[in-house]
Amino acid sequence: MESVGSCARRGPNAGRGVKTLARIAVAMLLLALPSFAFAQGGTNRSEFDQWLKATEHQGDVPIGTKITMSNWQQYKQFMPLGMIAFFDGRYYWKMPPDVEMEIGPSHEEGNLPKSWVEATEKYGAQTQVQVLPNGHYVLHNYYGGTPFPKPEEPYKGWKILANAFWGYTPAIINQNPINNNWGTVWAQDRYGNISASSLDYVYRMSDYITDPGFQHTYNYAPGTWYTEWIMQESPEQARYTAAIDLFFSDQEANPFPDVYVFVPSLRRSLRLSSASRCSPVFGFDWTNDDAKFNGFNGSTSIYTADYLGDRRILNLTVWDDTQGGRFPEGWDMPLGFPKPSWGKWELRHSAIIDAHRIPSEAAGYCYSSRIMYVERAMWLADWVEGYDTAHKLWKFFWYGNEVGDVPNIGHQWKSIPEAVAWDVENSHQTVWSDHGHPNWKEGGMLIDQNVPQDYRNGVRYGSPAGLMQILR
């Protein structure tokens, strides 16, 4: 295998060469708050600290309230800072004039499978963290479930980060070409140009599995606890480009996930260097460290986090997940924001952390701060703000984690049917939907027993050797 590096981030003029960058990437790696006002030219990290102070004593939002452009300032204490910036109109990406967010009841009970909750209750008290002399963090005695169900000091921020990183993931999730049930990503620039990419994927756990009907551990990729396989179906020039990420249990020995990319024109795979953590996945606005529904896809060895406080934050949790399958007509444009017809918003109790690399590993890394609004019911970050090395807001992410009825399984975390990454510095965005296929009212993400048997092949869809079977 060859090793390939990549640049840490795209510059301000990157939009002009997005198509070229994407091809190279897939080939080679694939009312401002009362206490403050937004700075001219962007949002500084210090303004988040002011937001945190100004929102210390939150009130309430009555059910039935409709938040619009005329009254949003009354409810901004329940919004992540990035959302406030969109309402404020500071960036190219702005809230549409007809935006409406109706408030409904919260759904913070029964979000996780019974087997996950039982594993948390059984093993949570034994999980521990050790900080080595080199500053790296080591997780001990983890067996499954939420590592730290009641995170406290010391290292409270890191424990919350660990809860998100090791948070609930089904034994296997999948979308595939059967019945054209693929996922779709749309990229949009400031000129309204939209390009679509269709994707197949198999994300699966290889260890610490708690879902019924699956082994606790699989050995198709020895030493791993989680693997991600993804392949492009379109556009045609990128078809069959694929990548696999391997996440290892021993993160001290493997502080970075291994990433392999299959390049169809070469008919072989390449192993990427650790510098690729900041590279765009398939040319999208998610880097390798962004591209998972928990809001963080790095590691818990060389990353830590500061606990900043708890707030109740607005989010969609129960909605009509098919609506986002039509872009742009299904979205409130040009921002690419959920329409009122999708469903009602709710308040989620969230622990807020600032995740970043430890000092000895921070040089050259693209984000100086990753503000994560980690909702406590599922320990997933629904909103994330990424600050660049100059401590300016660079990207704002929404990860639409949905709770609902899963066929043959029950009521629990259902999928991440929609997600958006807004690059506010380069006026670019990437939108995801698991219903972005011709039969958008049907299909979507498949979980566990609903995944076709062929896609449960761990070697083919969970190991580097499987990449060599793509064109056979």
Image (spheres, grey):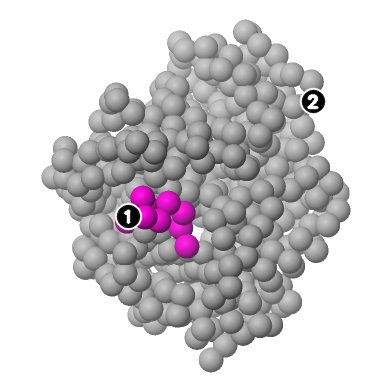
- Magenta-tinted stretch: 249-258
Q: Can you see residue 243?
A: no
Q: Which residue is mark 2?
A: 41
Magenta stretch prevailing secondary structure = loop
Determine whether, in the image, residue 295 is placed left or right of residue 389: left
- Residue type at mark 1 is Asp
Determine whether, in the image, residue 152 is placed left or right of residue 195: left
Residue at the (69%, 53%) spot, across then down = 7
Residue 250's label in the rendered image is: 1
Residue 208 lies in quadrant: bottom left
Coordinates of residue 19 in the picture (x, y in percent): 79, 62
Quarter placement of the N terminus: bottom right
Residue 209's label in the rendered image is: none
| Residue situated furthest bottom in the rendering | 472
Q: Can you see residue 421?
A: yes
Q: Is residue 240 depicted above or below 128 in this figure?
A: below
Residue at the (40%, 56%) spot, across then down = 254
Coordinates of residue 35 in the picture (x, y in percent): 62, 8
Determine whether, in the image, residue 363 is placed left or right of residue 169: right
Q: Is residue 3 depicted above or below 64 in this figure?
A: below
Coordinates of residue 186 in the picture (x, y in percent): 69, 58
Nearest the viewer among 41 and 347 is 41
Q: Residues within 10 Å of mark 1 (few under 14, many from 20)?
A: some
Local secondary structure at mark 2? loop
Q: Is residue 285 depicted above or below 239 in this figure?
A: above
Which circle's residue, 2 or 1, is located before the other in the chain?
2
Residue at the (63%, 8%) spot, across then down = 34
